[in-house]
Image: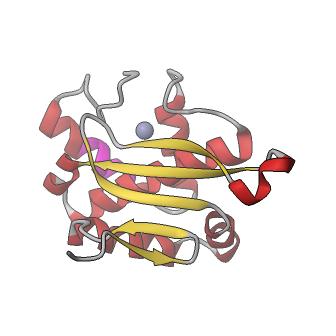
Amino acid sequence: MDKAWYEVGNWSLDANMSPKLDKALTEFTSRIDDEMFQRFGQEFICIVDCAIGASTIRPLDVACAPHAKKKFRHQVYIMIFRREVERLSEKATLGEVAHEFAHLLLRLDHKIDSETIPTGEDMADTLAVSWGFEEEINLNLAEWEALEGPTRGRGHAAR
Ligand SMILES: [Zn+2]
């Protein structure tokens, strides 16, 4: 059987990830500034592209046996992209990636679970735009709307 994951630093990427999403992830990491790159690089992130319904971040709290006496736990973030991302253009796919990383940063640095609060989608978009992904975010919004209508947006459960 083929390898299920390939690893880049602390990140584990689904080895069967779609080439388009893989390319968007590579472009995202090449465009963010060094500080942001280091920030995300510190975190344990698993990236998967088979979510049903919505792209999302799922934190996983893992108890670590060698640290058990200290009650130390490892936080792993599972970033899962919707299957339907395949239907987006390359730029809109990059917008999806930037949007999910913005959700992750809001969680990491501000302890905000922006996927469950009403203004969370806008917060994530605004943050991604501030990183220089305005065109990609606008295309992402427009393409989801064309595919699924204005009420679905990116298809987060909270919407
Ligand atoms: Zn979102």
The picture quadrant where one finds residue 56 is top left
- Percent from the top left, x then y, of residue 64? 68, 54
- Please report the residue visible at 25 percent of the width from the left and 43 percent of the height from the top: 142
Name the main secondary structure of what is drawn in magenta.
helix
Front-most of residues 100 and 76: 76
Q: Is residue 128 visible?
A: yes
Front-most of residues 18 and 155: 18
- Percent from the top left, x then y, of residue 35? 70, 71
Magenta stretch holds residue 16: no
The N terminus - image quarter = bottom left
- Please report the residue visible at 46 percent of the width from the left and 34 percent of the height from the top: 121
Q: Is residue 51 left or right of residue 80?
A: left
Magenta extent: 135-142
Image vertical order of residue 116 relative to residue 28, above or below: above
Residue situated furthest right in the rendering? 70
- Percent from the top left, x then y, of residue 19? 22, 72
Front-most of residues 23 and 137: 23
- Percent from the top left, x then y, of residue 109? 72, 47
The picture quadrant where one finds residue 131 is bottom right
- Please report the residue visible at 26 percent of the width from the left and 22 percent of the height from the top: 151
Magenta stretch holds residue 136: yes
Taking the image as four quarters, which one is ligand 1 found in?
A: top left
The C terminus - image quarter = top left
Q: Is residue 92 left or right of residue 111?
A: left
Q: Is residue 136 visible?
A: no
Q: How many marks?
A: 0
